[in-house]
Image: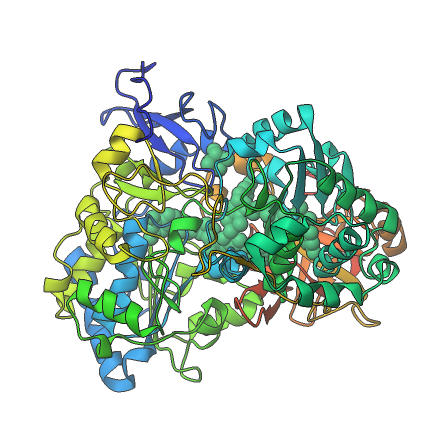
Amino acid sequence: MLPQPLPTLRAPDPIATRTHCPYCAFQCGMLVTGTDGDPRTEVKADPEFPVNRGQMCIKGFTAGDLIDHPARLTAPKLRARDGRMVPASWDAALDFVAERLLRLRAAHGPAALAAFGSGALTNEKAYLLGKFVRVALGSPNIDYNGRYCMASAAAGQNKAFGVDRGLPFPIEDIARTKVLLLWGGNCALTMPPLMQWIAEQQSGGKLIVVDPRRTETARLADLHLQLTPGSDLALACGLLHLAIDERLCDLDYIASRTQGFDEVRRAVMQVHPAHVERLTGVSIDDQLRTVRLLAAEESGMLLSGRGPEQQSKGVDTVLAFTNLMLALGKVGKPASGYGCLTGQGNGQGGREHGQKADQLPGYRMIENLEDREALARVWGIDPATLPGKGKSAYELLDALGPEGGIRALLVFGSNVAVASPNARNIERKLGSLDLLVVCDAFENETSATAHAILPVLQWAEEAGTMTNLEGRVILRQPARAAPAGARSDLEILCALAERLGHGERFPSSTPEVVFDELRRATAGGRADYSGITYDKIRRAQWIFWPCPSEDHPGTPRLFEERFQFPDGRARFHVVRHRPAAELPDAAYPLYFTTGRYKEHYNSGAQTRRVSALVDAQPAPRVQVHPRLASDLGVASGGALLVESRRGSVTFGVEVSADVRTDTLFAPFHWGGKLSANILTNPALDPQSRMPEFKVCAVRARAVALPPSLPGDGGTA
Ligand SMILES: Nc1nc2c(c(=O)[nH]1)N[C@H]1C(S)=C(S)[C@@H](COP(=O)(O)OP(=O)(O)OC[C@H]3O[C@@H](n4cnc5c(=O)[nH]c(N)nc54)[C@H](O)[C@@H]3O)O[C@H]1N2
Ligand SMILES: Nc1nc2c(c(=O)[nH]1)N[C@H]1C(S)=C(S)[C@@H](COP(=O)(O)OP(=O)(O)OC[C@H]3O[C@@H](n4cnc5c(=O)[nH]c(N)nc54)[C@H](O)[C@@H]3O)O[C@H]1N2
Ligand code: SF4
Ligand SMILES: [Mo]
């Protein structure tokens, strides 16, 4: 049966358009109003979208400011001989970019051309960008910012379950689980409307939060495990050890639905809980309490955020989570299992449609012969001409310039100069390119050294599908007229393809037409969208993938009967604790970890433009425990110079007992001198190539507060 259509909206305003928020993966239903003559775009929460149920956060409520913003780019800009950026016509800008791409390809080969995509892009854009790089540029080098975000959880779920869909169940299941283990996610700030489901969950169940800080989320928990940064893998393996020791595992489930438990049992039993206590700082009592709670109830769920995933062992940590939940027999059971809280608006769809260096649309693998042939058929090319695997996000950026060999970079939807680890290195490399093209609605730190900036439409001005954290495919509808002078990403890609001599393979920039091609390209793949159409979404409001045929209703829940391996069984994987790539030592004695404020989004490229958000959070502050602050001789309102092996940043200080005494925390939403990523370590997970944003070693000393920095401007 198809999902029932929602009752027709009684619009509070006759011209309200139903669409979705431009920011995070919750993709709150949103009503946008405003007439073309009226300069103000108003947004309200959609009371009838069942995910946010009438709630939004302050970023969503102020998103209309981005549409009407005076700093919006409305004409292409090219760098003139004197170094200034000057406005140019679209023809001149596109001709310039295409000519340079052709020249650089002729001189250095196709792999010298690269693109960087984003989980902010619609499915259609992610799809067309991947095709553009492989077909029109002929280069293997495309990757995207999801590599900084979802890559470890995705790799882990693929290895354990045979498919990766952030949440393999709808959000409502969270409210019904008896025990929720929320591991390294601060959703009270990063997905505030999710908290209504957690409040329901807590009315009859228990919440356990694992975070080195006592966050707004941890404060609500029945049990908070305030572990040492980077020790998640040890803790998760330790919990499985205790579950086995206490005979809490579900042996029937293990026997009938999984493979590989014995090896895992042998490995985890070698590590004693007391050793885990030393590694993690979590007492054996609290470890025991956690597994007993989790095992005692019929339903139980582990959801992870970026805390445990953004580590150089993120994949193994996720595998330790899937091991634990499989051993307890929870995965695929009602209101139970493992899920990852996907981050960006289309973080889920963005990783399914071929902008990942090693993947093709529909979650096909670029090095698999059958997958290559399937895609080559859809694209009408010889599979032999399809490039192989490209470099992962940080490795791609690190290879920019004459030394690394990548001469040209096109950026769609990421502020890589701020969002990348060891940011100073990336800034330098961006500056050494022969061609940097940034397609964005606003200038940002990355476009500072661009040769061409191409202004794009924003979410409320164009149609496109997004796949939210639950795998629910939704449709963004245009609510405002597009500003003169800006073009859609799809138009830009088609116009460039035409100039590169591939126009016939990029015949349309109409989102629905591109989606129809995407449907064909994903047919038979792991993320099968072939049965989803715009009309079907318009009627039903959403469809969960996989949806392999037009009469298929979509799949809200995965793994109820089988996992996505030929034998239908989930896989255990042997994983063992290992330390972070950089640990505190005599020279750099403190842990440094990073994360988010409620008011700002990622690199801040958008939210630092919204005055209500800047007023509420004007600058980053480093969070310091009172005992450490007193050792360092600093108080709230003062400043600390924080140094790592890669660089230094002076932050205003927020003294708070919510952080461990051995750890400093700062958000990464600012660029320039205030970029937390000046400090972070670009150590990569060997499997997912995810950088270690959550752990590095620093030292700190008190300095005078620079006049440019506000003091203790509020709380995080
Ligand atoms: N307001 C706001 N909301 C957002 C975003 C935003 O930028 N701002 N971004 C969106 C995106 S793209 C994403 S990916 C999500 C991210 O959402 P979250 O995962 O909730 O975000 P983070 O703040 O990066 O990390 C979560 C927590 O990890 C903790 N942590 C740090 N180190 C460790 C560790 O070693 N182990 C453990 N267990 N925890 C650790 C931090 O203290 C932090 O509280 O949010 C989305 N929503
Ligand atoms: N230290 C540290 N660093 C981190 C993290 C961390 O926790 N700590 N988290 C990482 C994570 S999880 C993420 S997701 C990244 C995010 O960081 P970034 O990759 O920089 O992402 P955003 O800041 O969201 O930048 C989005 C840009 O895309 C533009 N944009 C939005 N929609 C579109 C569109 O449709 N088309 C085009 N062309 N442009 C568009 C916006 O205007 C903005 O300039 O940061 C990573 N970096
Ligand atoms: S929770 Fe996410 S989707 Fe909802 S309003 Fe906030 S940023 Fe937008
Ligand atoms: Mo993210």
Pick the front one: 207 or 406:
207
Which quadrant of the figure has residue 67? top left
Task: Residue at 32% x, 27% y: name it.
Answer: 18
Q: How is the image coloured?
A: rainbow
Identify whether 301 is placed above or below 670.
Answer: above
**230 sits to left or right of 372:** right
The image shows residue 321 at horizontal and vertical percentages of 64, 54
Q: From where the camera sits, is residue 663 visible?
A: yes
The image shows residue 385 at horizontal and vertical percentages of 22, 78
Pick the front one: 577 or 488:
577
**508 sits to left or right of 539:** left
Q: From where the camera sits, is residue 478 visible?
A: no
Identify whether 359 is placed above or below 35.
Answer: below
Query: In the rendered image, which quarter contains the C terminus?
Result: top right
**551 sits to left or right of 261:** left
Identify whether 302 is placed above or below 526.
Answer: above
Task: Residue at 86% x, 51% y: name it.
Answer: 284
Query: In the rendered image, which quarter contains the N terminus?
Result: top left
Task: Residue at 48% x, 28% y: name it.
Answer: 52
- For this orientation, the residue located farthest to the left is 504
The image shows residue 247 at horizontal and vertical percentages of 78, 50
